[in-house]
Image: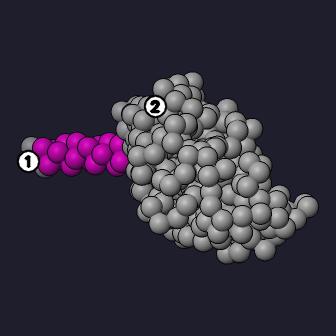
Amino acid sequence: MKKLVVSVLSTVLAFSLAACGSKTETAPTPAEGGAQGGQQQEVTLKVGASPVPHAAILKFIAPKLKEQGVNLEVKEFTDYVQPNVQLNEKQLDANFFQHKPYLEEFNKGQNMDLQPVIAVHIEPFGAYSKKVKSVDELAEGATIALPNDPTNSGRALALLEKNGVIKLKEGAGISGTVKDVVENKKNLKFKEVEAAMLPRVLEEVDLALINTNYALEAKLVPTKDALFLEDKESPYANFLVARPDNKDSEAIQKLAKELNSPEVKKFIEDEYKGSIVPAF
C-alpha cells in the first residue's frame, strides 16, 4: 500500500513539473510580446532644442505623444553647435532648432550626415536697434552686428541689401560675406558676434540682425520691435532633424506628425502672433 501511494505521488509530481515547464516555454518574453496586458510599450525620445519657440512647441505636444507611447524628453540648448554634435554622437535622438542651409553647412564642415525630417515653422529674421527708429537714421560709420556663423551672416547681409542698407556683389545672395559688400554709402562697420549673444550687444551697436528665437528669449517682439523683417516667403524653415539610422523610425515619425498637426499650427499662430509662421 505504501509503495502504491509513493507511486501515485511520483506520477502527480511528474505531471505538475511538466505543466510548469510547458507554461514557462509558452510565456511571452519582453522581446516577443512587448508590453504585457495589451499595454503599449513606451519609447523615450531625447530631443535637443532652442528654448523659444522650439522647446515650447515640443512641450506643447508632449502630452499627445505620451498617449501614443512616446515619452518626450526635451533638452534645451542656447547654442547652435552642441545639439548637432550630441545628435551625431547618439546622446540625442533628434533636434529641433535649425534651418536647412545651416544644417547643410554644418554637415559639410563637420563631415556629418544629419537628416532633415520635416519643416515646422519659419522665424522671420529681423533688424533691431535701441538707437535708431529707421535705417535712414543710421549715422556715418555706424556699427551693425551680424551672426558669426556663415549661413546666418549671409542671410543677415541679404536682408540688409533687400532693405537698401548695402549692396552685395552680384550673385552673392544668402552666401555673401562682408567681403562681398560692394556698396556701403555710410561706411558702416560690421561686427560678427555669436548668434546667442546678439541681444546682449544690442545696446553697444547701432543695429543688430537677430535670429527670432534669440529675439523672443530677450523679450523682443519681432512684429513690433524690429525695424524690418524677412517676409513670409523666407526659405529658412526650421526643421526637425534626426540621423539616417533613426529618421524613419515609428517614434520619430509620430513626433513629426504631431509637429505638423493643426493643433501646433494654431498654437504657433496664437502664441507668437506672426513673429513665427507655420511652414505647413
Which image quarter holds the N terminus? Answer: top left
Residue 129 horizontal side relative to residue 21, left or right = right
Residue 38 horizontal side relative to residue 8, left or right = right
Mark 1 or mark 2: whose residue is earlier in sequence? 1
Q: How many C-alpha atoms fall within 10 Å of the one at disc 1: few (<14), some, or many (≥20)?
A: few
Q: Is residue 61 visible?
A: yes
Q: Residue placed farthest to the right in the image?
A: 170
Near-viewer residue (96 or 144)? 144
Q: Amino acid at mark 1?
A: Lys
Tell me the element at label 2: helix
What span is in magenta? 4-25
Label ID, residue 2: 1
Near-viewer residue (261 or 57)? 57
- Circle 2 residue: 271
Q: Residue at x 57, y 24 (%)?
A: 262
Quadrant of the image occupied by residue 167: bottom right
Q: Please identify the dominant SS of the magenta region.
A: helix
Q: How many C-alpha atoms fall within 10 Å of the one at disc 2: few (<14), some, or many (≥20)?
A: few
